[in-house]
C-alpha cells in the first residue's frame, strides 16, 4: 500500500542536468617539484557538465585548461638547474559520490561533501627558455630519444590520467549550484617536465643535434663554482637526470558555479480516488 501511494503522489520535479564554469589554479608534482603543494601555481579554469543520477550519485564531464611549471631553483637539485613550463588541456569523465543526499528542494538537504574519480585525456608540451628563446623540448630529444643508446622514440604529448579528489556542493534554490573542488591527476607519463631518465652523452648530442640541444639537455655548466669561479662541468653520460620510477602528477583546485536545466525527474500526478462515504 505504501509503494502504491508513493507512486501516485502529487507531482514533484527536479532538474537532473547542470552546466557551468570552474575557475582556480593548477600546479605540478614531479622531478622538478617532488613534494611542495601549491608551488608555482597558475590560473586555470574551464567548463563542466554534471548529470545527477540520484541524490547520492552523479556523473560529470570537465573541459579544463591551465599551465604547469617548475624549476630546480631553491631545491636539493639546484645544480641540475633545469626548468620547464607547459600549457595543459584536459577532458575528464568522472563519477561523483555525495556523502549526504543532495536536493534542490525546499525543506531538504542542500549541501554535501563528495569524492570523485574517473578517466582523463590531456595534452601538454614542455618548453624551456634559453638566451631569450623558448624551445619545445619534446621535439629536441634532450635525453637522446631516437639516438643510439637512448629511448627508441620521443614521448607522446597526449596522454591519459586518473583523476581523483574531493569537493563540496551547495544548491541555491531550484536552478543553481556552487561548490569547490580539489583534484589530482595521476598521469601515465614521466615527461610533463621533459625529465625522466639519465644524461645522454652531451658531446654526441651536440654532434647529432646541435649546441642548443646540448645546452638544454644539461644546464649545469650555466652555473659558476663559488670556490673556483669557473663554470661547472657537464654531467657524465649515464648519471641520473630524473627519477623514472615515479610518474608525474598535476592538480586543479577551484570553485564552480552551475545552472540546472531540463531532464526533469517527475513522478506521476494521478491522484487516488476519494473513498465513498
Image: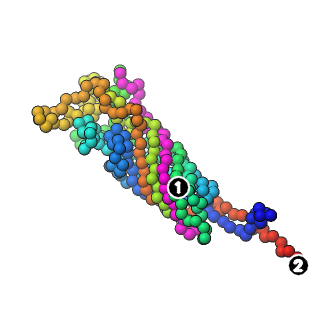
Quarter of the rendering occupied by the C terminus: bottom right
Q: Nearer the viewer, residue 251 or 147?
A: 251
Task: Classify 29 as above or below 139.
Answer: below
Farthest residue toward the bottom? 277
Task: Classify 5 as above or below 221.
Answer: below
* SS state under label 2: loop
Contact, mark 2 vs mark 1 (Cβ under 8 Å): no
Task: Classify 175 as above or below 162.
Answer: below
How are the residues colored?
rainbow
The answer to whether residue 150 is magenta is yes
User: What residue is disc 2 on?
Assistant: 277
Would you call the spot at circle 2 few (<14 residues within 10 Å), some (14-19), or many (20 or more)? few
Farthest residue toward the left? 228
On screen, residue 198 versus residue 45, left or right, reads left
On screen, residue 194 versus residue 175, left or right, reads left
- The answer to whether residue 261 is visible is no
Q: Toward which corner of the image does residue 112 lie, by quadrant? A: bottom right
- Residue numbers of the magenta segment: 149-175
Residue at x 48% of width, y 40% of height:
160
User: What residue is disc 1 on?
Assistant: 114
Question: Residue 81, position in %: x, y?
Answer: 25, 38
Residue at x 69% of width, y 63% of height:
266
Task: Classify 66 as above or below 13.
Answer: above
Question: Residue 115, position in %: x, y?
Answer: 52, 52
Residue at x 37% of width, y 45% of height:
28
Amino acid at each position: 500500500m505504501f509503494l502504491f501511494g508513493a507512486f501516485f503522489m502529487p507531482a514533484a520535479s527536479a532538474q537532473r542536468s547542470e552546466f557551468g564554469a570552474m575557475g582556480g589554479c593548477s600546479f605540478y608534482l614531479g622531478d622538478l617539484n617532488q613534494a611542495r603543494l601549491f608551488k608555482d601555481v597558475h590560473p586555470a579554469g574551464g567548463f563542466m557538465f554534471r548529470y545527477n543520477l540520484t541524490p547520492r550519485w552523479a556523473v560529470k564531464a570537465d573541459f579544463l585548461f591551465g599551465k604547469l611549471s617548475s624549476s630546480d631553483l631553491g631545491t636539493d637539485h639546484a645544480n641540475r638547474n633545469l626548468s620547464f613550463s607547459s600549457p595543459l588541456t584536459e577532458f575528464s569523465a568522472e563519477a561523483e559520490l555525495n556523502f549526504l543526499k543532495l536536493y534542490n528542494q525546499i525543506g531538504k538537504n542542500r549541501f554535501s561533501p563528495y569524492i570523485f574519480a574517473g578517466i582523463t585525456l590531456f595534452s601538454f608540451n614542455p618548453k624551456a627558455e634559453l638566451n631569450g628563446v623558448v624551445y619545445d623540448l619534446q621535439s629536441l630529444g634532450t635525453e637522446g630519444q631516437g639516438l643510439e643508446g637512448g629511448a627508441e622514440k620521443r614521448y607522446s604529448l597526449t596522454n591519459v590520467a586518473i583523476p581523483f579528489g574531493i569537493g563540496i556542493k551547495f544548491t541555491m534554490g531550484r536552478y543553481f549550484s556552487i561548490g569547490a573542488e580539489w583534484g589530482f591527476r595521476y598521469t601515465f607519463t614521466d615527461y610533463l617536465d621533459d625529465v625522466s631518465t639519465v644524461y645522454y652523452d652531451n658531446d654526441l648530442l651536440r654532434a647529432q643535434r646541435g649546441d642548443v640541444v646540448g645546452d638544454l639537455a644539461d644546464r649545469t655548466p650555466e652555473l659558476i663554482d663559488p670556490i673556483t669561479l669557473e663554470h661547472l662541468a657537464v654531467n657524465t653520460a649515464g648519471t641520473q637526470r630524473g627519477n623514472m620510477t615515479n610518474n608525474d602528477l598535476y592538480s586543479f583546485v577551484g570553485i564552480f558555479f552551475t545552472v540546472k536545466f531540463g531532464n526533469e525527474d517527475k513522478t506521476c500526478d494521478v491522484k487516488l480516488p476519494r473513498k465513498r462515504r
